[in-house]
């Protein structure tokens, strides 16, 4: 429903953290002079059970610290979750009150309805308040399901002063004493007070009863499993709401449809007139997503010229290539201010500290201290007009910021370009739920999984060894994943990302609702200059040929992505020089996009059986290629295996399956059998299986290279150990 949902949040807990960072991003836009958001407020509606999610309360200090008085939370405290009470022996409202007051929020409690006011006025010695405060939530849930006599006996009956307080009331009157969240006057007063409060975010804790007004559901543990009301239940519901529906009409409707007849009070009823007037004031009868952002003038080809030159005699990591391009983008007079760099306390790790003095870290309070590195050229600087969002050690917060920025084209009518860079393992592995929500919200932007790969980031523990993020990314329909090997590939991919998301792409010419995800590495490698006959279409669609071998002898096709390309490059040299085998080299920029293309071709053929069959792009690219195909990457085998169905040859895959290996890069790659010599042996074995190479030579190669011994790599220099 792309025209309906504006803030789908997928899972419980994401509403909370998403609303905080949305309110914060509204202030960010205002402080940076991009849009006046002074009159905008963010309202979030949640349940007390949802507060158990870590994301619900995990960021409330951010809202208080930044004085987000443009944020109001309404927590429906009906004391129940799916299976039973939220805290049966406790008091969830008081517990939440303590959490929020302690964090610095303004707290408004709407606990008891107006009918309790007279009783509270009589409570001169505090016995009633004490009884309310000492009664556990589980008991209040039980009272909501029992009659007035039970409540008189069990709530008021333990103290003669309480009994006397309600002796003038009938059991029916006691039964109908309401919770505050069902008193519309008190709810209105709370909303009004929240809207006028300044200097703090506000939370409204409203005490309610789940299933209120439906006798069959009120306060019952099984409420969520009760999908249909019986006819007697419907009659009670009708009577409770004073609806003018006769028994006859109700019975006829129930017999025909299993439900109640639709009731409309009439077009001139005051309720209908009020609702229509409010919907008109709010912009229409239903929520509607509108894209009113003005088109951006995107940088031309000259912006990408430097990356296309390669590294020359030097080496640099693909992470540095991406960061270098970001710096250039930020200098652009058209899109520069639209970029929103985001990092969870890792700017220095990714070589972005040079941006601190110029772009500055966003802080609405400015910088009220002298930085310890103030005398240095690249000192840490904060500013209310800062461009860089530094989220601390919170990938969940960073994702919420990326979502707010990436959906600003719709929410605010302003194109903003999130550039969220993070440790690769802490992206889809850690916040995949949030990334799904970002996609569901039709947000756009760049996710950069830096320090990627199972063996590339050594020395920081196996929890950092990412060998599977591309697979997780493949499950998200909006994610366009690339694993580039060269800086010139990065230039085309990033340029295409801008054009697709912020140019004239998409069905309406206002950009596509996709998210570009690049995995890049911290290992310095030689970056070739862009060849004159570069296959840009192949780069963007997932595969292009980098080199065709010249010479006689058996032939193989070697494919690699990302940091794996130097391995197949070295393998090709060894195959030619030591074994007389020629190898063509392919760079696979996206296993995921190739797999999607193949699946799309099969889907089209299924739906058009009488028409000319479509073929997968990778099948077309490899058509006519000689010999077996060997694929390798710094990810588990399942990543390259995504395209196995469409490779028109014997297909062998090497990958880094497992948790990781704590050693040097060469040793780890030997352990996983993904290094150059392992590729050589795999290629020779594939040729031998086809009868094109002697088996005994394969045995010789495996023994010579000691592919089963990680210690055999002890003399191999590790590039970029300090990267």
Image (spheres, rainbow, N blue to C red):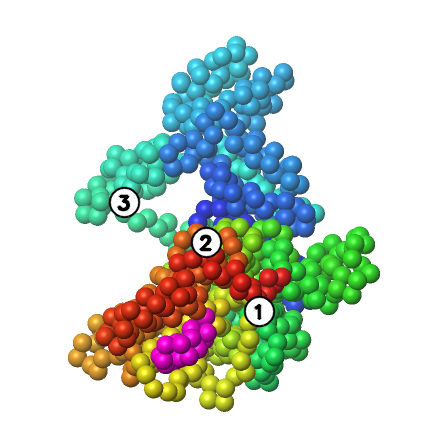
Q: Are marks 1 and 2 in contact (CB under 8 Å)?
A: no
Residue displayed at 59% across by 46% down: 59
Front-lying residue, 664 or 63: 664
Q: Between disc 3 and disc 1, whose residue precedes?
A: 3
Label 1 neighbourhood size at 10 Å, few (<14), some (14-19), many (20+)? many
Pinpoint residue 79: horizontal percent, then vertical percent: 46, 33
Q: Are marks 3 and 1 in contact (CB under 8 Å)?
A: no
Pinpoint residue 698: horizontal percent, then vertical percent: 32, 69
Cα gap from disc 3 to disc 1, whole angstroms: 69 Å
- Above or below for 115 versus 434: above
**Extent of the magenta region:** 567-584
Cα gap from disc 2 to disc 3, whole angstroms: 60 Å
Please tell me whether mark 3 or mark 1 is closer to you in this view: 1
Residue displayed at 50% across by 77% down: 489
Secondary structure found at label 3 = loop
Which residue is denoted by mark 1 in the rendering? 524
Q: Between disc 1 and disc 2, whose residue precedes?
A: 1
- Above or below for 539 versus 460: below
Cα gap from disc 1 to disc 2, whole angstroms: 21 Å
Q: Which quadrant of the figure has residue 469? A: bottom left
> Which label belongs to residue 660?
2
Secondary structure found at label 1 = loop
Left or right side of 436 for 447: right
Q: Which quadrant of the figure has residue 370? A: bottom right
Left or right side of 303 for 589: left
Which residue is denoted by mark 3 in the rendering? 260
- Above or below for 292 versus 144: below
Front-lying residue, 140 or 232: 140
Residue displayed at 53% across by 80% down: 528
Secondary structure found at label 2 = loop
Pinpoint residue 25: horizontal percent, then vertical percent: 61, 58
Front-lying residue, 481 or 359: 481
């Amino acid at each position: 429903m792309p025209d309906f949902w504006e803030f789908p949040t997928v899972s419980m807990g994401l509403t909370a953290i998403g609303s905080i960072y949305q309110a914060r991003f509204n202030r960010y836009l205002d402080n940076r002079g991009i849009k006046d958001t002074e009159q905008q407020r963010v309202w979030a509606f949640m349940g007390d059970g949802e507060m158990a999610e870590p994301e619900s309360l995990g960021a409330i200090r951010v809202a208080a610290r930044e004085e987000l008085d443009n944020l109001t939370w309404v927590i429906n405290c009906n004391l129940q979750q799916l299976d039973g009470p939220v805290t049966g022996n406790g008091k969830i409202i008081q517990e939440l009150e303590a959490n929020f007051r302690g964090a610095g929020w303004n707290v408004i409690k709407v606990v008891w309805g107006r009918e309790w006011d007279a009783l509270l006025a009589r409570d001169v010695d505090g016995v009633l308040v004490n009884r309310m405060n000492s009664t556990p939530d589980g008991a209040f849930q039980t009272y909501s399901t029992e009659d007035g006599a039970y409540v008189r006996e069990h709530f008021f009956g333990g103290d003669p002063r309480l009994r006397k307080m309600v002796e003038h009331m009938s059991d029916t009157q006691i039964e109908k004493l309401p919770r505050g969240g069902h008193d519309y006057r008190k709810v209105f007063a709370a909303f009004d007070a929240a809207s006028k409060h300044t200097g703090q975010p506000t939370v409204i804790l409203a005490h309610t009863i789940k299933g209120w007004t439906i006798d069959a559901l009120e306060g019952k543990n099984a409420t969520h499993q009760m999908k249909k009301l019986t006819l007697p239940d419907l009659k009670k519901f009708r009577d409770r709401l004073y609806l003018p529906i006769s028994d006859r009409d109700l019975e006829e409707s129930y017999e025909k449809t299993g439900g109640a007849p639709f009731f409309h009070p009439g077009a001139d009823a005051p309720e209908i007139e009020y609702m229509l007037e409010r919907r008109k004031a709010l912009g229409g009868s239903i929520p509607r997503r509108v894209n009113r952002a003005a088109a951006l003038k995107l940088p031309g080809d000259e912006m990408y010229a430097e990356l296309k030159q390669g590294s020359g005699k030097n080496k640099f990591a693909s992470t540095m290539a991406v960061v270098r391009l970001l710096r250039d983008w930020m200098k652009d007079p058209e899109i520069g201010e639209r970029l929103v760099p985001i990092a969870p306390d890792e700017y220095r790790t990714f070589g972005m500290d040079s941006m601190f003095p110029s772009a500055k870290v966003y802080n609405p309070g400015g910088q009220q201290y002298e930085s310890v590195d103030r005398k240095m050229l690249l000192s840490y600087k904060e500013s209310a007009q800062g461009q860089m969002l530094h989220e601390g050690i919170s990938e969940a917060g960073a994702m919420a910021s990326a979502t707010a920025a990436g959906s600003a084209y719709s929410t605010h009518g302003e194109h903003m370009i999130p550039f969220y860079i993070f440790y690769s393992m802490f992206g889809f592995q850690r916040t995949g739920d949030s990334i799904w929500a970002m996609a569901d919200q039709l947000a756009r932007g760049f996710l950069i999984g830096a320090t990627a790969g199972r063996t590339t980031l050594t020395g920081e523990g196996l929890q950092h060894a990412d060998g599977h993020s591309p697979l997780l990314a493949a499950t998200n329909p909006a994610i366009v994943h690339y694993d580039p090997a060269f800086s010139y590939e990065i230039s085309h991919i990033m340029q295409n990302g801008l054009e697709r998301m912020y140019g004239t792409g998409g069905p309406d010419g206002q950009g596509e609702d996709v998210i570009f995800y690049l995995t890049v590495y911290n290992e310095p490698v030689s970056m070739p200059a862009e060849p004159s006959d570069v296959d840009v279409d192949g780069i963007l669609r997932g595969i292009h040929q980098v080199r065709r071998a010249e010479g006689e002898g058996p032939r193989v096709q070697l494919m690699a992505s990302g940091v794996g390309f130097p391995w197949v490059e070295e393998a090709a040299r060894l195959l030619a020089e030591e074994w007389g085998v020629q190898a063509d080299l392919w760079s696979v920029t996206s296993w995921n996009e190739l797999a999607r293309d193949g699946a799309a071709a099969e889907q089209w053929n299924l739906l058009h059986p009488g028409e000319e069959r479509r073929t997968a792009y990778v099948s077309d690219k490899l058509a006519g290629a000689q010999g077996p195909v060997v694929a390798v990457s710094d990810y588990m085998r399942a990543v390259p295996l995504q395209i196995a169905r469409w490779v028109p040859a014997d297909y062998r895959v090497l990958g880094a399956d497992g948790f990781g290996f704590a050693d040097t890069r060469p040793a780890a790659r030997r352990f996983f059998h993904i290094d150059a010599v392992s590729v050589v042996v795999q290629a020779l074995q594939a040729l031998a299986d086809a009868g094109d190479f002697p088996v005994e030579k394969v045995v010789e190669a495996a023994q010579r290279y000691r592919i089963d011994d990680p210690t055999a790599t002890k003399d191999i220099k590790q590039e970029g150990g300090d990267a």
